[in-house]
Amino acid sequence: MHTVIIGGGFAGIKAALELANKQTGKITLISNSPYFNCHASLYSILAGKSKRQSKVTLSDIFAHINGVDIVQDEVISINPEKNIVRSKDVAYEYDKLILSPGMVSDDLGINGVKSHTLSIRNLEDIDKLRKRLEANTKEKIAIIGAGPAGVEFAGALSEWYEAIDEVADITLIDSGNRVLPTFSKTASRLASRKLRDMGVKIQLKRSVQEVKSSHIVLNNGVIPAKNIIWAAGETLSPIITKHVQYFGIEENRVQVDDFLEAYEDIYVIGDCAKASGSGTADGAVYMAEYVAKHIIHTMMGRKSRPYHHKPDIKSVPIGSNWAYVEQSGIYVSGKLGSLTRSEIENRLYRQIMPRVQAFSALNPYS
């Protein structure tokens, strides 16, 4: 059996490892990057750490794993009738296909977002931003989007400015009525307090109408800023949106059945799946484990129980020594939250990579 996996994030890596462990046949993991994007060390290069030090390669992760071929390529089409996916130059036949491409940035149709904002989705983005900020530390900064990415980066930026003995002028903007809208109200309240204590200004119920090179046009005014960071919108990967004739789409996610199957022999896991656990690393790992086990059961002629994920663990760090973590109405914050988040991250990273690589990813300053 040949299983093709698209996406080199938590879900794709874990699925490949689980299938390889059970010797299910040939496995091809296709990613458009040779690296696993280590979110834990993503913002560490604000402190000057090199991109090379912050990267963990997929080849290192699978160095001692038999049966997995790592291919750097970009799949541009899927043909479920013939069980083939294609890149520009190569056709890959599959018996089972696992799609875990994650999400991509979306400008939400707002003029100027593509041309006048900076992304913070990968190490190259952060390195580019750091160099720009170092060139002029006095320029105002605006972050559009007060979800986990925007909140975390606002805290990281504030801490970076403090480390270089500069005063930051950071404004966090969101159209909603609270930061971290997918978290509890307690999370929003404590995160807002922490950000304000760090000098971050928060502008809520402010809808962005247009982005210019020197300012943001809102529904009720203008905010001047030359460094404008986009952390607001995301959408499905093109490999999904170009093939909507095969997939049901609901709330900007791919519909899956009780076994995470979106089409015959095609499974969708990770952030792009319309399933419990979507949007979290913990959920991505759990989905990957489930799909791998289900594929193995199918090979053996056994039935699988329907997919069910326990309540999500949600967490967000604000600075290097403060975090908020919640699950099922129970939460911790502050230094204890930071320690709890570190334990969660350590467990997750150890599930997808060897101990040495996990330590490097989780200790970006060592």
Image (spheres, grey):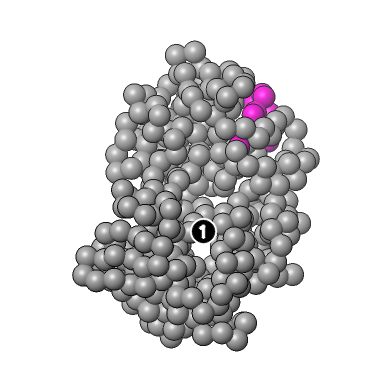
| Extreme residue toward the right, this view | 64
**Residue, disc 1:** 120
* Left or right of residue 195, residue 86 in this image: right
For image coordinates 43% across by 21% down, the residue present is 264
For image coordinates 44% across by 59% down, the residue present is 117
For image coordinates 45% across by 75% down, the residue present is 140
User: Please, what is the three-letter code of the amino acid marked with disc 1?
Assistant: Ile
- From the top left corner, tell me how far across and down residue 89 is, in percent: 62, 22
Quick one: label 1, few (<14), some, or many (20+) residues within 10 Å?
many
Q: Nearer the viewer, residue 296 or 38?
A: 38
Look at the image and give the residue range highlighted in magenta.
19-31
Q: Nearer the viewer, residue 8 or 32?
A: 32
Occupied quadrant, residue 218: bottom left
Whether 263 is drawn above or below 344: the answer is above
Q: Quadrant of the C terminus?
A: bottom right
- From the top left corner, tell me how far across and down residue 295 is, in percent: 53, 28
Look at the image and say whether residue 23 sits in the magenta stretch.
yes
SS state under label 1: loop
